[in-house]
Image (cartoon, grey):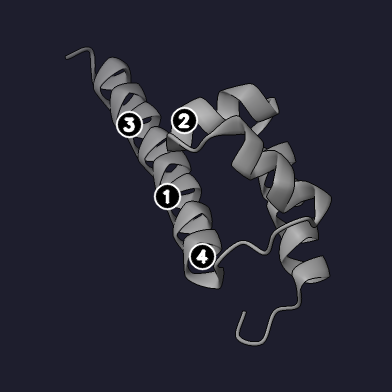
């Protein structure tokens, strides 16, 4: 994501938020970001720092993996009857 333009980071942020199924309000609460800041980033009024966008994507990816691994672990236990 080096050299990402404002338009690219804005589109990626919107895509990232949409992939979570969260509204702007929920996304802001989840990441503890002021609503107005997210709104400015998505509208292109301000450019979001690239490192923050990468960190947000990483957190979402890791938490989805964590949810997947927990559900697989629980299924394994239930299948064994333990």
Give how far apart the Cα atoms at labels 3 and 2 are: 20 Å
Mark 4 — residue?
54
N-terminal of the pair, mark 3 or mark 1, is 1
Labels 3 and 2: the sequence-earlier one? 2
Q: Residue at x 56, y 71 (%)?
A: 50
For residue 80, the mark is: none
Instruction: State whether residue 22 appears in this view.
Output: no
Question: Is the residue marked by circle 4 packed among few (<14), some (14-19), or many (20+) residues within 10 Å?
Answer: few
The quadrant in which the N terminus is found is bottom right
Image x and y of residue 31, in percent: 45, 37
Q: Secondary structure at mark 3?
A: helix
- Identify the residue under disc 3: 70
Of residues 35 and 71, which is closer to you in this image? 35
Task: Please tell me which residue lies in front, 60 or 23.
Answer: 23
Q: Which residue is mark 1?
A: 59
- Point out the frontmost of discs 3 and 1: 1
């Amino acid at each position: 994501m080096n050299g990402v333009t404002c338009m690219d980071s804005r589109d990626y942020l919107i895509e990232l938020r949409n992939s979570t199924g969260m509204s702007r309000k929920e996304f802001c609460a989840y990441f503890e970001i002021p609503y107005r800041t997210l709104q400015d980033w998505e509208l292109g009024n301000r450019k979001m720092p690239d490192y923050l966008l990468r960190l947000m994507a990483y957190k979402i990816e890791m938490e989805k993996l964590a949810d997947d691994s927990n559900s697989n672990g629980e299924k394994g236990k239930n299948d064994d009857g333990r």
